[in-house]
Amino acid sequence: MAWATGMTSLRRSFNALAVCLLCAVPVSVSSQAAAPAPFTPGQMVETVVCGSDPTQSYALYLPSTYTSAKPWPIIYAFDPGARGKLPVKLYKDIAEKYGFILAASNNSRNFSFADSSKGASAMWQDTHNRLSLDERRIYTTGFSGGARMAGTVALRCSQCRIAGVIAHGAGYPSTNRPADRDHLLYFLAVGEQDFNWPEVMTVRREREEAGQPYQVRTFSGPHQWAPASVLEQAVAWMQLKAMQAGTVARDESFIERDFQQTLGEANDAEKGGDAIAELNALRSLVSDFSGPKDVSAQEKKLAALKTSAALKEALKKEQDLISMQQSLMGEIAPDLSALANADGEQRMSVRRDVFAGMNRLRNEAAHNKSEEKRHVYSRALAGLWAQGIETGQAQFEAHNYATAEYYFQLMADLDDDPWPTLLLAEARTGLGNHKQAIKDLRDAVKRGLKNPEVLENDANLQPLGSEPEFQKLLAELKGK
């Protein structure tokens, strides 16, 4: 598909730039020589300005027990919308519970390769200069395009020595894949309605076949950061693997608790006839607990399951669902992509076809008798919606504001989410249509936009700052 080829090209450029900048970062900073952090442990800081580059910042959480007298593990987070405080706020309680530092870039974002690379590099250098870090336990996490950024740092920056990646709603970076013998820890989390579900399942299959360490968790929800409970499972797994590797002192009660929980998951999956879930649990029991626990019984069960008809059938069914989603999207995606270059009556005709096709998917997602197929239709619909938004954003970045406006308007007509109307306001601001842009922002508020900071901090809306109606809208939001 043309749109897929374009996205691959964008990601290739992004990866190359990210590697160039990250590998220039001095990663040999001694954690013991780190200066005392000018932060209060146990309190979230939304904006830490980087000392080496004041245009870059990150959100930060230090555990309440933090002291520079010892090294600490850290998770670097990347949000696709440069919303560093979002993952920090969502996961700070997990960071507190397990004694991890959490730092999230306020600049790394989709569709801006320079911002993403500079943000990651500056955050890395600043945290290494200010904080006492355990170089053996450095992890990355991210959502969607941020998950690809997290993977890029881990896979392409050998000096960074990343111990593990926690990817939400995406798999590997498009042009970077682990080597066959790579032992990088990879935890993948994905919603049942996430359009990237097939991608995550494919990564799970590949890592299973290659014998690479992984965990995959699904949750009820769309394309989003995973719930805090899922992030806790990821951090607990990273802790367990650190104990297994000897980089963290063994905690026998922790190991036993985690073992019993995973054993329970394996037993529940077997009783419920879920061969893939049983495979995941048994593989974890064998690979994650070998040594501290006797897993010989689980090894035998795992070997038998791998050759069973039940697993073969389950994998075929999973592949059928993946193929079904690809087919559904393939019927509409080319037309959605073609809108960028169509005009006049042709554009109107293609738009009608796209609109009708996506509404058919919406209807099936709501009313199909099969729950599994409802998920497939939901994922296909979400994938096409994301394609429309991403195509509009790419057009916006290229200053093709009228084409971006067309895509954002279509997506706004298809869904009552506030995001397309916010993007519409940006596009119309770029076109100089301030009056309509403010109307779009009011529409976004009606659709659920509540945070005035979103409007105040949006650089693409800055030309509206002097408009009385814009200031009135901000005042109304702040008064709620």
Image: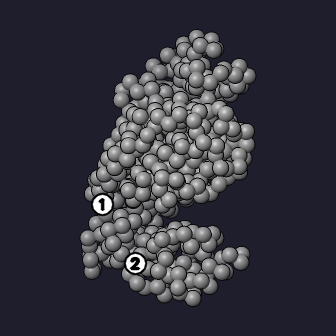
* Mark in front: 2 vs 1: 2
Mark 2 Cα within 10 Å, few/some/many (few <14, many 20+)?
many
393 lies left or right of 334: right
Residue 31 spot, x, y in % from top left: 56, 35
Query: Percent position (x, y) of residue 121?
Result: 44, 48
Observer-nearest of 229 and 375:
229
Q: Is residue 465 shown left or right of residue 151? A: right
Q: Are the residues at dot 2 and dot 1 in contact (C-beta closer than 8 Å)?
A: no
Q: Quadrant of residue 469?
A: bottom right
User: Residue 311, relative to residue 458: is it above or below?
Assistant: above
Q: Label 1, secondary structure: give it.
A: helix
Check disc 2 and give the amino acid type.
Gly
Q: Position of residue 24 (x, y in %)?
A: 38, 43
Crowd class of label 1 (few under 14; some 14 to 19; many from 20; radius 10 Å)? some
Q: Which residue bears the numbered disc 2?
A: 430
* Disc on res. 334: 1
**Could you tell whether 293 is left or right of 171 in the image?**
right
Q: Nearer the viewer, residue 159 or 303?
A: 159
Give the image quarter of residue 407: bottom left
Q: Quadrant of the C terminus?
A: bottom right
33 or 105: nearer the viewer: 33
Label drawn at residue 205: none
In the rendered image, the vertical position of residue 105 relative to residue 312, given as above or below: below
Question: What's the residue at 32%, 73% (across, down)?
Answer: 400
> Left of 436 or right of it: where is 273?
right
Give the amino acid type for the residue marked by disc 1 in the picture.
Pro
- Residue at position x 63%, y 69% in the image: 451
> How far is disc 2 from disc 1 in space, using C-alphas?
27 Å
The residue positioned 60% from the left and 37% from the top of the image is: 132
Q: Is residue 467 visible?
A: yes
